[in-house]
Image: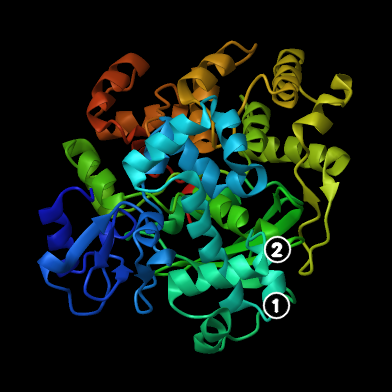
Amino acid sequence: MHTHTERCVRAVQSKDARFDGWFFTAVVTTGIYCRPSCPVVPPKPENMRFFPSAAACQQAGFRACKRCRPDTSPGSPEWNQRADLVARAMRLISDGVVDREGVPGLAARLGYSTRQIERQLLAELGAGPLALARAQRAQAARLLIETTPLPMADIAFAAGFASIRTFNDTVREVFALSPTDLRARAPRSTPGNTPGALTLRLPFRAPLNPDNLFGHLAATAVPGVEEWRDGAYRRTLRLPYGHGIVALTPRPDHIACRLTLSDLRDLTVAISRCRRMLDLDADPVAIDDQLRTDPLLASLVDKAPGRRVPRTSDEAEFAVRAVLGQQVSTAAARTHAARLVTAHGEPVDDPEGGLTHLFPTPEALAALDPESLAMPRTRRTTFTTLVRQLADGEVRLGPDSDWPETRARLLALPGFGPWTVDVIAMRALGDPDAFLPTDLGIRRAAQELGLPSTPAALTARAAAWRPWRAYAVQYLWATDSHPINFLPV
């Protein structure tokens, strides 16, 4: 996008928020970079320079605008719709891998040399992995400075900086303010109900329809791990340095996020996983425009545009739950999962009550007695094979997953058919083109709309919906009266 100068100029001049996160505008006369929707008077086109990332702007010597705060714009939707090396690297950087394992660790996870990764990231994003991770650390530091009373030394290390000096220098360079000045400028927020909780705003590209997004998460919530309370979806999070509890509330122009963390170093990872779970970096205008080209889908899109794909904060957890949900009702699947949580989950303290455990790890589930599972023997074999493969690393479902390879590995497991593989691809891997032509709800919806209802014919018709077939699934599911399609009261 940033190489199309005329399009970028038009987006900046019209203050089009749809392009926030797609590219950043640097102004050579002021030394400041902004998001396209910045409310200030647009600069002259000859003074604009366009970059693909905030890190690239910082590398070129520009500092963040204090009005539009480009560091808080939604992420690029590119990383959620692609499965190539750059997209996988960006998902891992967002998950904090560079901060924890360095660039060699990032390269090892992706199976490439550090030189290859640096070259490809520089070519596409104008910045290498260290610069991208540095920009993320700066954003985390700003959040902690503005939303907590923590001492600056604690914030420096929580945000991932190796020293207080590096923290001070980076904040001054990126924001043109010292950490103390940043805190002084921050609005005085009302204290939350939970001591020690961080209150954040998660931005998204409008429109966003929260009905199926939060309806799905709430209707399938596993007791002890998830709940819907007081208009918020709450769940426990297993994080690299500890655990967390998050409450997510849909608002007209953002998602209100309240995080309680056992270790503040997990802040950026927790935010990244919440954004991924709610599909907040999607580009709904591009998706809906593509789906509207099918006249039989257009009415569904126009009725409730902006549907997102409800995803997950823990890919291995979702795969286990997908197996538990094979050929049983939503209530039965929740019951099976709740038993596993009570028996094998890790207890946590919830200051607000209601949440009691982290979902069990694959290692804990691989060690259980298969005879204790109240399910048919064939599904028991499917379950035990999956958790063993996950525990051994034979099947990898993290943000670095190679989608075609992971699909092939899952299909090779006993009891894994196309439906199970595609629902994992859609909600755990994040494949925007995953499709469920054999799903009963999809076939019913297709029949009601006059679409082909046989899997082969429906798949052929859905070719025109690519690469957004996972979003078409959400619109088709929404024709049913199942609780997953409605925002809980």
Q: Which residue is painted at 30% across and 66% down in the image?
A: 35
Task: Reply above or below: 175 against 305.
Answer: below
Task: Please name whichever residue, 404 or 12, is drawn nearer the observer in this view of the structure.
Answer: 12
Given contact means CB atoms under 8 Å apart, are the residues at marks 2 and 1 in contact? Answer: yes
Distance (Cα) linking label 2 and label 1: 10 Å
- Amino acid carrying label 2: it is Leu
Residue underneath mark 1? 150
First of labels 2, 1 by sequence position: 1
Residue 264: assigned label: 2
Q: Which residue is painted at 39% across and 57% down in the image?
A: 59
- Amino acid carrying label 1: it is Leu
User: As drawn, is 134 to the left or to the right of 77?
Assistant: right
Task: Reply above or below: 337 against 190.
Answer: above
Residue 211 at what x, y percent from top left?
A: 44, 55
Task: Reply above or below: 151 against 375.
Answer: below
Residue 17 at what x, y percent from top left?
A: 27, 64
Q: Callout 2 environment at 10 Å: few (<14), some (14 to 19), or many (20+)?
A: many
